[in-house]
Amino acid sequence: MTKQPGFVTNPTRTLTVLSVSPLREDHLSLQGILDHSRWKMLTAHDRSSALPLLAGHDIAVVVCEADVQGRTWIDLLEGCRNLLSPPSLIVASKFADGRLWAEALNLGAWDVLAKPFNHIEVIRSVKSAWQRWHDQIQMRAVPMRVMSAAG
């Protein structure tokens, strides 16, 4: 199958998605969708296994199951704020309703995906989450370029 167009602006750079869920089927479903792109996917079963991956890898997007051990996605969102380049966090749930969507966006998540995953929705959400992450990096780089030019 062909690679999903438009995912990577720099073909030499591998972009990474982290799937956080205790459910193996979540990881398999996401991997099946992302296999048709240039994205690499890492997996974690909970917050404690996700944080070392976030600290040790350049992860652009996190897809986190909403119903993991209480408030894992909120804890993970808080933990990401301390990173130099915090990833965009997408909350996934089989109960993706207006209440979850409002809560997630108000707390700083990028999006909410309903499960079972819809191929088109996952691609749309991950691409827009990556674009937001990429734009944030570019905006932080502008002052550095201005300071270098001024010096």
Image: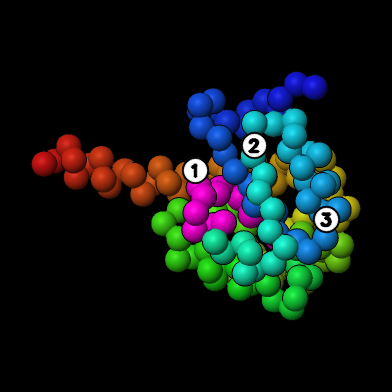
Classify 91 as above or below 57.
Answer: below
Q: Earlier in the sequence, mark 3 or mark 2?
A: 3
Q: Residue 26, image x and y in percent?
A: 82, 54
Residue 64's mark? none
Classify 5 as above or below 29.
Answer: above
Q: Residue furthest top?
A: 2
Name the residue: 53% across, 68% down: 79
Coloration mode: rainbow
Q: Nearer the viewer, residue 149 or 116?
A: 116
User: Magenta segment, which residues?
Assistant: 53-64
Q: Residue 66, image x and y in percent?
A: 75, 67
**Residue under pointer 3:** 24
Q: Residues within 10 Å of mark 3 (few under 14, many from 20)?
A: few
In the drawing, does residue 31 fall left or right of residue 142?
right
**Does the rendering let one see residue 111?**
no
In the drawing, does residue 28 fall left or right of residue 34?
right
